[in-house]
């Protein structure tokens, strides 16, 4: 007996079309509700978390770099400050020492000048005294001589003229 | 990794061993078409065949509507409500049958069932009515449902993992999650986003993901021993393509319809020529989608079955020795095609989804017309279809250069 065979690649089958439509629409609804929603949401959440984390990390890195730069700057400033202070202190010490030396020198100079002046004055007074003493001695000597020869007044005049002719020093 | 390899080799060995054993058991020639086509049974040969339920929406002889359900084709025949439709040029047989009422008919049915040919018969109501819609469960429907259930199972359990926080707050863990997350992200970032744009992709992502994984799983089920490829059925691919078509038209922007019904950027006298082309273009896209998927998945199986069939052809023509001699060559070639099929399974799932996204993207995109018209000539000259298909923002006023999807396959 010969029959029409159903097996054919291009056999239209509207029952199958309806079945598959139902299956596919149900699949779409179920997956949309129970799978794709949660999955895509979770993936997006994760991506946002990762993005946020990267941003935070970058911010933190930038902050850290900023802080490091600040620290470096502060350290350099502190170093410069310390060096400046040290230099200033040295200069101060130098200046103070120089001042001290100068002052001492001045004092010495002054003392020397004073001593010289003193010596001069002493010398002058000694000379004056000496001159007077000498004059007196001369007068006494002359008196002794002239008592023998002259009177006193004439002799005194002679001696005075002699003394005046003496050099002042 | 090791598990996959073992599994893969097991499947391969099973697949390669089944058709010859099947043919041997049936004592018939290996018919690739017959094995690729849909049927009302699950083929577990050489173990056996499982007949599927037959459901008929019928208009009975008296004009009333009826619905008949049988557990199997055999029980439908046994009920005498349905008989195999007589074929063309079978008048002698039909004559003989009518002459041999009652007992002879019963014997004929028994003989038919025993031969196994009843499963390929086209059943018609015995009372003279006709079947309006044959809702019978077919092999491809079973595997489509199986595929759908697998997809649901995979992705609801994946969703539960994310709900537990694995992959949401932490890195995804394990082969399962990483594998499917990669695919989901691929569909989202490589298919949906570039073709639909940031503005629209979220809306269509569920459809694209569903289509991609349903097609992929159905494709792969066809490579499993005793499996059948639901996507090698034109009816099923047509339903998928129709879904894309409906989504495209329902979500079409004003620009999309403007582009179809009054193409901008061309002289008015050209428009009467272009408008029918554009309208045809609306339908060729989903038709091409359906045929591409169907043809690719069918072709691979036909090639494998044909290569296996070579063993029996040579055996029959030149003797069993030559048949055995040809077997290693045939098996090596079918192994190669099998691996190709594995690749094709992924590629076709990708192409279907990619083109769906592209078509929807073209329809939902809103254009700056002044800009487009000003540069229209330039675009006509500069873009060829491949670039056009790849561009995320298709250019309007370019109907004659619509991507020709068949060329992609």
Image (cartoon, rainbow, N blue to C red):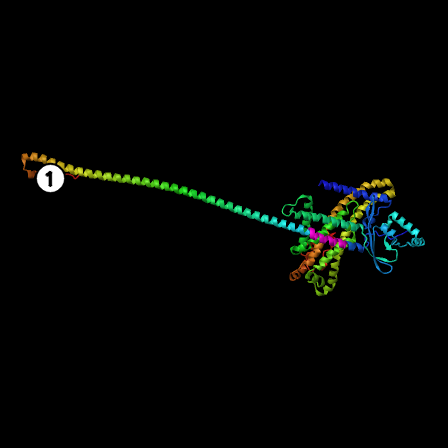
Q: Nearer the viewer, residue B188 or A93?
A: B188
Q: Nearer the viewer, residue A133 or B18?
A: B18
Residue A116's x, y, as percent? Answer: 23, 38
Residue B17's x, y, as percent? Answer: 81, 42
Q: Residues within 10 Å of mark 1 (few under 14, many from 20)?
A: some
Q: Nearer the viewer, residue B400 or A60?
A: A60
Residue under numbered circle 1: A160
Q: Say left or right for B318 vs A127.
A: right
Q: Looking at the rendering, which quadrant does residue A13 occupy?
A: bottom right
Q: Residue sitting at 53 percent across and 46 percent down? A: A65
Residue A23 among magenta residues: yes
Q: Say left or right for B60 vs B398.
A: right
Look at the image and tell me whether residue B25 can be seen.
Answer: yes
Residue B144 among magenta residues: no
Q: Residue sitting at 68 percent across and 48 percent down? A: B160
Identify the chain of the residue marked 1, using the numbered disc in the image: A
Q: Say left or right for B143 vs B186.
A: right
Q: Nearer the viewer, residue B128 or B186?
A: B128
Q: Looking at the rendering, which quadrant does residue A158 occupy?
A: top left
Looking at this view, name the residue that lies furthest to the right: B99
In which quadrant of the rendered image does the C terminus of chain A lie? top left
Residue A54's x, y, as percent? Answer: 59, 48
Residue B28's x, y, as percent? Answer: 86, 45
Q: Which secondary structure, mark 1?
A: helix
Magenta stretch, overall SS = helix
Please provide the residue range marked out in magenta: A20-35
């Amino acid at each position: 007996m010969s029959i029409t065979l159903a097996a054919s690649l291009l056999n239209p089958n509207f029952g199958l079309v309806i079945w598959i439509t139902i299956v596919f629409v149900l699949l779409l609804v179920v997956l949309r509700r129970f799978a794709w929603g949660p999955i895509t949401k979770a993936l997006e959440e994760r991506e946002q978390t990762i993005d946020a984390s990267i941003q935070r990390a970058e911010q933190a890195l930038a902050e850290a770099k900023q802080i490091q730069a600040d620290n470096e700057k502060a350290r350099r400033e502190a170093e410069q400050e310390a060096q400046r202070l040290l230099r200033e202190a040295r200069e101060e010490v130098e200046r103070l020492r120089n001042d001290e030396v100068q002052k001492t020198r001045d004092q010495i100079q002054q003392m020397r000048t004073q001593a010289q002046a003193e010596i001069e004055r002493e010398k002058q007074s000694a000379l004056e005294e000496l001159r007077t003493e000498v004059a007196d001695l001369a007068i006494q000597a002359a008196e002794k001589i002239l008592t023998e020869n002259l009177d006193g007044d004439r002799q005194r005049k002679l001696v005075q003229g002699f003394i005046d002719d003496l050099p002042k020093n | 990794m090791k598990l996959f390899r073992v599994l893969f080799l097991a499947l391969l060995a099973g697949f390669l061993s089944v058709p010859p054993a099947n043919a041997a058991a049936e004592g018939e020639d290996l018919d690739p078409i017959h094995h690729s086509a849909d049927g009302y049974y699950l083929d577990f040969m050489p173990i056996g065949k499982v007949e599927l339920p037959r459901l008929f929406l019928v208009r009975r002889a008296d004009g009333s509507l009826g619905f008949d359900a049988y557990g199997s084709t055999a029980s439908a025949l046994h009920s005498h409500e349905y008989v195999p439709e007589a074929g063309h040029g079978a008048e002698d047989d039909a004559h003989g049958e009518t002459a041999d009422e009652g007992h002879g008919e019963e014997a004929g049915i028994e003989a038919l069932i025993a031969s196994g040919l009843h499963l390929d018969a086209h059943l018609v109501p015995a009372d003279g009515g006709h079947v309006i819609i044959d809702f019978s469960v077919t092999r491809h429907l079973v595997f489509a449902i199986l595929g759908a259930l697998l997809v649901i199972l995979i992705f609801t359990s994946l969703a539960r993992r994310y709900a537990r926080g694995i992959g949401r707050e932490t890195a995804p863990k394990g082969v399962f999650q990483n594998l499917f997350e990669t695919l989901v992200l691929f569909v989202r970032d490589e298919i949906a986003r570039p073709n639909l744009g940031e503005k629209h992709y979220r809306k269509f992502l569920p459809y694209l993901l569903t289509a991609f994984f349903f097609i992929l799983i159905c494709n792969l089920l066809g490579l499993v021993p005793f499996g059948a490829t639901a996507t090698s059925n034109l009816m099923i691919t047509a339903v998928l393509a129709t879904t894309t078509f409906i989504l495209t038209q329902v979500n079409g922007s004003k620009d999309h319809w403007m582009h179809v019904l009054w193409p901008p950027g061309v002289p008015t006298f050209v428009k009467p020529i272009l408008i029918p082309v554009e309208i045809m273009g609306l339908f060729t896209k989903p038709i091409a989608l359906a045929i591409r998927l169907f043809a690719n998945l069918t072709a691979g199986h036909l090639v494998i079955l044909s290569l296996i069939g070579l063993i029996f052809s040579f055996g029959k023509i030149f003797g069993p020795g030559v048949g055995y001699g040809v077997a290693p060559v045939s098996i090596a070639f079918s192994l190669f095609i099998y691996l190709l099929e594995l690749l094709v399974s992924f590629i076709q799932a990708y192409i279907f989804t990619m083109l769906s996204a592209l078509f929807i993207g073209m329809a939902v995109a809103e254009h700056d017309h002044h800009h487009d018209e000003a540069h229209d000539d330039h675009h006509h000259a500069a873009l060829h279809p491949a670039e056009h298909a790849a561009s995320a923002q298709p250019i309007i006023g370019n109907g004659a250069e619509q991507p020709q999807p068949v060329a992609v396959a």
